[in-house]
Amino acid sequence: MRMFAQSRRPLAVSILLVSAGLLAACGGSSSSSDSADGHDHTDIESAGRLALYDADSSAIKVVDLDHGDVLSSLALSGAAPTLVASPGYRYAVAIQRADDRVSFVDGGLYTEDHGDHMHDYAETPSLLALTLNDHRPTHYSPGEAHGVVFFDGGDAARSKVTAFSDASLGNGDAVASLDLENSMHGVAKLIDGHLFVTYRDASITDTTLPAAVERYHLDGTRFEFEARYSEPCPKLHGAAANSHELAFGCSDGVLVIDLDEAGYPARKFANPEGLPEGARIGTLVANHDVEALVGIAGDQLFVINAESPAQPYTELDLGGSVGRVAQGFTTHGEAFYVLGDDGALRLFDPANGWALVSTVSVVAPLTEASSKPALTPSASQDRLYVTDAPNQAVIEVDTTEGRVVRTLDVGFPASSLAWLGLTDSGHNHEHEH
C-alpha cells in the first residue's frame, strides 16, 4: 500500500501553563510558553472538535476529539441543519434551508495575533446571537478568507448572497451582501476579492436554474458589478475552484474561468463522451492545492484537467456497480475520497496519477432506507470523520495509512458534522456544489 505524506499538528494534547502575567495580559487560561526569543508564545496542540447535530434532542453537540467528551449541547429549533465549517474553522455554520435560517456555533478553539506573539485559546463552545434569515439558504462556499451563503429566494423573494469571515462573525456581523434581480437555485464564489455569482434572466421560466455567470468585486462592505460572461451555461448547477480555475457545471458541459489570466477569461468544455442520454456534470469538487478538478455525473466521476483542452476528462473507476454516496478532498488535497454504497471508503492519490491507494470499510452497506453518512476532514491532521448513525458513532479514518483508527461512541445518531479547531494557516477548504 502506498502511503500519503504525513502532515500537520500532532494528535497528542500538550497544554503548558504560562506565567500569570501573560495570562492576565492576554485574557486566556490555557496555553504553552516558549520564551527563547524573549517573547511568550501561547500554543495549544489539539486534535480539534466535532460539531454534530443530534436530531433526537434537537441540538448541536460539540465533542472534544482529544478525550471524546461532549463539551456543549446547544439547542437548535427547526429542521435538521447541514453543518459546515467557517473559513478559519473556528465556527460551525448551521444551514436550515426549510427554516430560512443560518446559525453559527463558536467551537471555542481559535488563535489571536497579539503583535509579538500568537495566542491560542480553548474555550467553551457557544451559539452566536447572529443569524442570517433570508429565503432558502442552500449552497455554501468556503474560501481562504470568506464563506459565502447563496439564498435561493422564491416566488416572493429574490436570491441573495451573503459573505462573512471568522473575524466578522467574532464581531457579530457579515462582511457584505448582494441582492440579485430574481430568484434562482444558484451559487457564488468569492475569490481574491472577486465574487463570481450565477445569473438567471427573467425570460427563463421553465427552470429555476441560472444560465450565466457574473463577476463583482468586493469594495469594503459592498459588491460592485464588473461584467457578465457572454459564454452561456444553461441549467447551471455545481461550482468549484482551485488556485487556477473556477468551474461551473452546465447542461452542455463545463464552463471554466481562468483565475490567473487578466480579465478572468472563460471557456467551455463539452460534456465527456459516453455519458448516458440526459446526463451531465452537476456537481464539482476542487481543492486549492490540487491542479485538477473533479466533475460528477450521477455515479460517474471525472478528473478535469483544464490545461489539456483536447482531452480534459479522465474517469475515476469505483469498481463494479458501486454507487456513489459522498466524496471530497482532504483539507490539503493529499487524498480524494469517495464513500460507496457498499460502505467502503476509497482513497485516491491526486499526486500519483489519481491512483486508488486504499479501500477502507467504514460503515455497513447502505440501502435506500439507510441514513446517509456525513463526512468531514480534519484541517490539522490526516483524518477523516464519518458518521455511523445506526450505531450512534463516528468513525475516524487515518487517510495516510488507509485504516480506521478509532470509533467514537457519541451516544446519539448524528446526521451532520463539521470539524473545528486550530489549523495551519493559508489553506483553502473547497466543498462540492
Image (tube, rainbow, N blue to C red):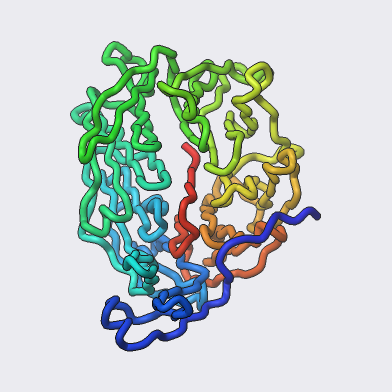
Q: Position of residue 391 (x, y in %)?
A: 56, 66
197 w.r.t. 212: above or below: below
Q: Nearer the viewer, residue 330 or 274?
A: 330
Residue 11 at x, y = what percent?
57, 71
Q: Is residue 179 left or right of residue 391?
A: left
- Reply above or below: 82 against 208: below
Regarding residue 121, the answer to whether it shows in the image is yes
Residue that protrudes farthest toward the left in the picture: 156
Specify the quadrant of the image occupied by residue 152.
top left
Residue drawn at x 52%, y 69% as measured from the top left: 47
**Residue 295 position within the rendered picture, expressed as x and y whole percent measured from the top left:** 58, 31
Residue at point 34% right, 69% down? Answer: 125
| Residue 338, quarter of the rendered image | top right
Instruction: Report whether 196 appears left or right of 24.
Output: right
Residue at far front of view? 38
Can residue 415 be spotted in the picture? no
Q: Residue furthest bottom?
A: 20
Residue placed at 81% from the left, 55% from the top? 1
